[in-house]
Amino acid sequence: MRSRRAPGQGRLLIAAGMMALGGFLPWVYTHLGSMSGAVGAGLWVFYAGLLALAGGLVPAHRLRTVIVVQSVLCGLVALGLPVWQVVYMLSLVGLQGWMPGPGLVLSAFGGVLCLLAARQLAGVRPVAAQDA
C-alpha cells in the first residue's frame, strides 16, 4: 500500500519546520541584546509547529477535515503571536530601540504558509481508494 500526500500537505510540512525553527530563534533585537522566542510566545509557536507537523504526516484521505481545522488553528497561532508581539513593542517604545528578529519573521511566514496549506487542503475533494 502506497501512501499519498494530498496537495497542501507538503506546504504544511514546510510551514511546520518554519514555525518550529522560528520559535527558538531571536524574536527581538534591542540595544541590550536579543530576546529569544523560547522565553515567551515563541514556545507556543513551536508547539503549534509540532501540531502542524502531525497534520502533514497523517493520511489525508481519512482525516482531511481534522487536518484543515488543525492547520487553521496552527496558522492563527503562528501568525497571531508575532503580530501581537510587534503591536506590543510598538505600543511600548514605538519604532526606536528595537528590531524584529529572524524568529519573529520566520514564525509569521510559517503561519501564513500554514493558512495557505489549510486553504489548499480544504479545496481538495476526497479521491476514492484505487487500491485493489
Image (cartoon, helix red, strand yellow):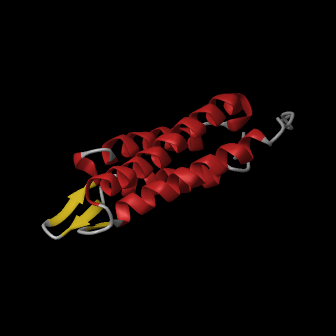
* Residue 91 image offset from top left, x and y in percent: 32, 52
* Residue 71 image offset from top left, x and y in percent: 58, 40
**Residue at position x 85%, y 37% in the image:** 127
Which residue is nearer to you in this view: 58 or 14?
14
Residue 70 in which image quadrant: top right
- Drawn side of residue 59 relative to residue 31, left or right: right
Which residue is nearer to you in this view: 126 or 84?
84
**Residue at position x 86%, y 38% in the image:** 130
Give the quadrant of the C terminus: top right
Residue 94 in which image quadrant: bottom left
One can see residue 3 in this view: no
- Would you place residue 102 above or below residue 18 in this image? below
- Would you place residue 66 above or below residue 58 in this image? above
Which residue is nearer to you in this view: 74 or 61?
74
Give the quadrant of the N terminus: top right
* Residue 106 image offset from top left, x and y in percent: 44, 61
- Drawn side of residue 79 relative to residue 88, left or right: right
